[in-house]
């Protein structure tokens, strides 16, 4: 196995361990819920990278959880074995192939499957019967269990107790609204709803689905309310950005995607959209709405004056506002030492050109000349236009300053070679005898530079 292949395998294992323990680190879980989740996770079967289907012990899961709480996702990276590279009874690929074949042919015994794969040349080793027995038991693939196993799915209703313990988000196509040029477009509503109280934490309209709108909603909730335990979304384009995933990993927020074409799991946000259509959008006259700002003003007025103050059957007759105020003391505030603006900056990588420039979103920026030919990382606020952005330059983890937008006119006045950048600034004496700079035309500067070079030649 090459080093690149080994790193890829380690990354798969790290991601798998993260998927097992991420929701256990939810700060809103009490000790009883944590123990129950640990038991549930230890009782199920997992597709372990390189190990096939198997169960995990509670002790193993607790160990991973401790590592994650202490060092984050990086703490879940596997450590290299001391006996790495030595021969074993079955390689990871052979074990996975053996368990996969055993699972798809439940009527066969483990020994018969091993003999068949050996005859076909897919397994070249000859492990002992005890090794095979331990492998089968650890994967939970005993013959009796395989024969009685049934593949049926269950849709279980779930509820959370504390506000912000689980937040659902989704987009809905609403009315057609005219833009600044008078052209009609569908107004898309992005909404975040709290699972425990049904309160809408954030909503905004736009003409397109964008991950930037999703990030703006998350940042608003963190600032206005507190820490989010988990986010439950579908697989739309707004929710799968790599930048968004990096930001949420940094904040320790678990992002859960529902299964494709299965909206039942997002029932609360879907029910809110249904209520919005029936009680708000159906009563609107699109031709009377001047734009997105006017639509947002009307929608937020309805949201605060009617929706949040109407009894909800799922809350036992309480209003979303009453449920929120009743449980607000369970909210965990954000750590004041966390710079939210810095966390939500995007990161991109660029290679510096030979003229000390890089390009971002079609705009040319200058960086220090010592970085020519190097690959650098840029941190910036994506919500600002390229002309207003501050680009923070990092090289190999070290901050190197800010990139500046290229001023091609000013660069045209810079003299190259052994002549100073400010050669066209001539030192003259004022009336009091002190020196002060006096700007001349670029042609004068070039003549002065020529005389300077000639003087150098004469001195030689």
Image (tube, rainbow, N blue to C red):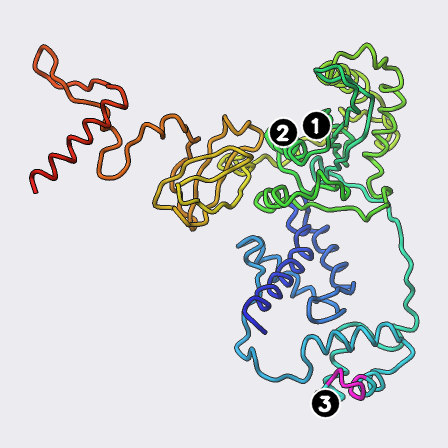
Q: Quick check: 425 left or right of 49?
A: left
Q: Quick check: 79 left or right of 438?
A: right
Residue with the mark numbered 3:
126
- Which image quarter: residue 274? top right
- Which image quarter: residue 40? bottom right
Q: Is residue 84 above or below residue 271?
A: below
Q: Residue 320: x, y in percent? A: 78, 26
Residue 338 in sight in this render = no
Front residue of 408 and 260: 408
Q: Quadrant of the C terminus?
A: top left
Give the residue displayed 52% in from the left and 77% down from the top: 82
The crowding category of the residue bearing disc 2, from other C-alpha atoms within 10 Å (few below 14, some 14 to 19, many at least 20), is few
Q: Are marks 2 and 1 in contact (CB under 8 Å)?
A: yes
Residue with the mark numbered 2:
220
Q: Earlier in the sequence, mark 3 or mark 2?
A: 3
Q: Residue 151: x, y in percent? A: 90, 62
Q: CA distance from mark 2 to mark 1?
A: 7 Å
Label 3 sits on a secondary structure element that is loop
Q: Earlier in the sequence, mark 1 or mark 3?
A: 3
Q: Are marks 1 and 3 in contact (CB under 8 Å)?
A: no
Which of discs 3 and 2 lies nearer the camera? The answer is 3
Q: Which mark is residue 202?
A: 1
Q: Residue 89: x, y in percent? A: 67, 85
Q: Quadrant of the N terminus?
A: bottom right
Give the residue displayed 56% in from the left and 77% down from the top: 84
Whether residue 228 appears in magenta in the rendering, the answer is: no
Front residue of 86 and 56: 86
Q: CA distance from mark 1 to mark 3?
A: 61 Å
Q: Residue 342: x, y in percent? A: 51, 36
Which residues, given as a range, are shown in magenta? 117-123
């Amino acid at each position: 196995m090459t080093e690149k292949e080994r790193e890829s395998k380690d990354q798969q294992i790290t991601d798998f361990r993260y998927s097992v323990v991420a929701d256990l680190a939810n700060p809103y879980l009490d000790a009883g819920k944590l123990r129950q989740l640990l038991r549930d996770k230890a009782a199920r079967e997992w597709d372990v990278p390189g190990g096939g289907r198997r169960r995990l012990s509670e002790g193993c899961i607790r160990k991973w959880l401790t590592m994650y709480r202490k060092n984050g996702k990086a703490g879940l990276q596997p450590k290299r074995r001391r006996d790495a590279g030595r021969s074993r009874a079955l390689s990871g690929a052979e074990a996975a192939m053996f368990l996969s074949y055993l699972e798809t042919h439940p009527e066969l015994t483990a020994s018969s499957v091993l003999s068949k794969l050996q005859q076909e040349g897919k397994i070249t080793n000859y492990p002992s019967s005890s090794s095979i027995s331990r492998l089968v038991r650890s994967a939970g693939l005993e013959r009796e269990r395989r024969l009685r196993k049934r593949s049926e799915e269950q849709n279980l209703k779930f509820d959370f107790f504390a506000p912000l313990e689980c937040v659902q988000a989704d987009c809905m196509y609403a009315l057609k609204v005219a833009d600044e040029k008078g052209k009609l477009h569908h107004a898309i509503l992005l909404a975040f709803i709290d699972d425990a109280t049904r309160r809408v934490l954030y909503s905004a309209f736009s003409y397109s689905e964008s991950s930037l709108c999703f990030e703006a909603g998350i940042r608003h909730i963190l600032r206005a309310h507190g820490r989010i335990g988990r986010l439950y979304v579908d697989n739309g384009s707004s929710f799968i950005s790599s930048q968004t995933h990096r930001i949420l990993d940094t904040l320790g927020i678990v992002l859960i995607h529902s299964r494709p074409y299965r909206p039942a799991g997002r029932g609360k946000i879907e029910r809110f959209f249904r209520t919005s259509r029936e009680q708000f959008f159906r009563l609107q006259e699109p031709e009377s709405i001047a734009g997105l700002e006017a639509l947002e003003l009307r929608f937020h007025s309805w949201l605060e004056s009617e929706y949040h103050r109407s009894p909800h059957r799922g809350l036992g007759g309480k209003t979303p506002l009453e449920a929120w105020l009743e449980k607000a003391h369970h909210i965990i505030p954000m750590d004041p030492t966390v710079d939210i603006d810095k966390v939500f900056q995007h990161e991109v990588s660029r290679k510096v050109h030979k003229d000390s420039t890089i390009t971002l979103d079609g705009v040319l920026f200058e960086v220090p000349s010592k970085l020519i030919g190097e690959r650098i990382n840029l941190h910036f606020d994506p919500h600002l236009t390229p002309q207003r952005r501050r680009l923070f330059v990092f090289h190999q983890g070290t901050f190197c300053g800010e990139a500046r937008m290229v001023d091609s006119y000013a660069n045209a006045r810079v003299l190259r070679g052994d002549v100073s950048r400010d050669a066209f600034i001539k030192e003259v004496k004022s009336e009091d005898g002190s020196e002060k700079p006096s700007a001349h035309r670029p042609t004068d500067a070039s003549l002065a530079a020529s005389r300077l070079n000639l003087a150098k030649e004469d001195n030689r």
